[in-house]
Amino acid sequence: MDNVVAYPNNEGVVDDAHTIRQIRIRKGLSIVQAAAALRTTPSNIELWEANPGMGPKRFVVSNHFDNFLRENDPGCGKNLLFNRYPLSLARDILSLNVEEIAALFGYKKSTWQKFESHTRVLSADDLARLEDMVRERFSVVCGQPG
């Protein structure tokens, strides 16, 4: 009992299990997905994760994340490639520059750059289309039918 440290009213103690980052990771969401769920920007998510006292209340965050997961296709955007690596990797795999991939998807170059920098969220349909293109590219490279 001599080594017990008491914090009155838990002031100054941040429970890591309840930070926005921990909730996001537990729910299996990327920063971009968390931003979409909370209707904010990825940079705000990063700011709130770096500063646990900022941002919405944790129960609100958890509820929004749960709603997002219920409403969105759990397969789209959650595979290893797009949950761990940037969209620029997909562009590199397809051997396209920013102008080419933006035109292919019907966006301006500046808009595609926002997708790659995570300041804008690519739609689920476009993400699924991009994943199909990467899958097709791998099947061609590996000599397997698509």
Image (cartoon, helix red, strand yellow):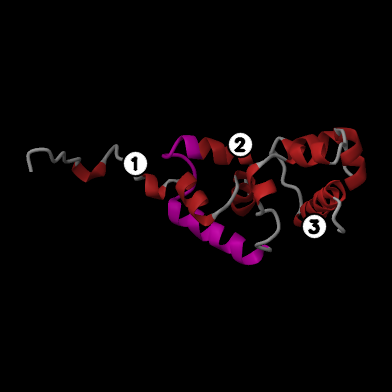
Is tag 1's residue or tag 3's residue first in the polypeptide sequence? 1
Amino acid type assigned to the residue bearing label 2 in the image: Ser
Q: Which residues are magenta?
A: 49-72
Labels 3, 2: front one: 3
Q: Quadrant of the C terminus?
A: bottom right
Q: Measured from the top left, where is residue 102 in percent x and y?
A: 87, 40
Q: Which residue is mark 3?
A: 125
Is tag 1's residue or tag 2's residue first in the polypeptide sequence? 1
Task: Give the vertical position of 1 relative to 65 (above or below).
Answer: above
SS assignment at label 2: helix
Binning the other alpha carbons within 10 Å of mark 2 as few (below 14), some (14 to 19) or many (20 upward) gives some
Q: Is residue 89 magenta?
A: no
User: Which residue occupies 61% across, 36% down?
Assistant: 43
Q: Which residue is mark 2?
A: 43
User: Which residue occupies 25% across, 43% down?
Assistant: 10
SS assignment at label 3: helix
Q: Measured from the top left, where is residue 60 in percent x and y?
A: 48, 56
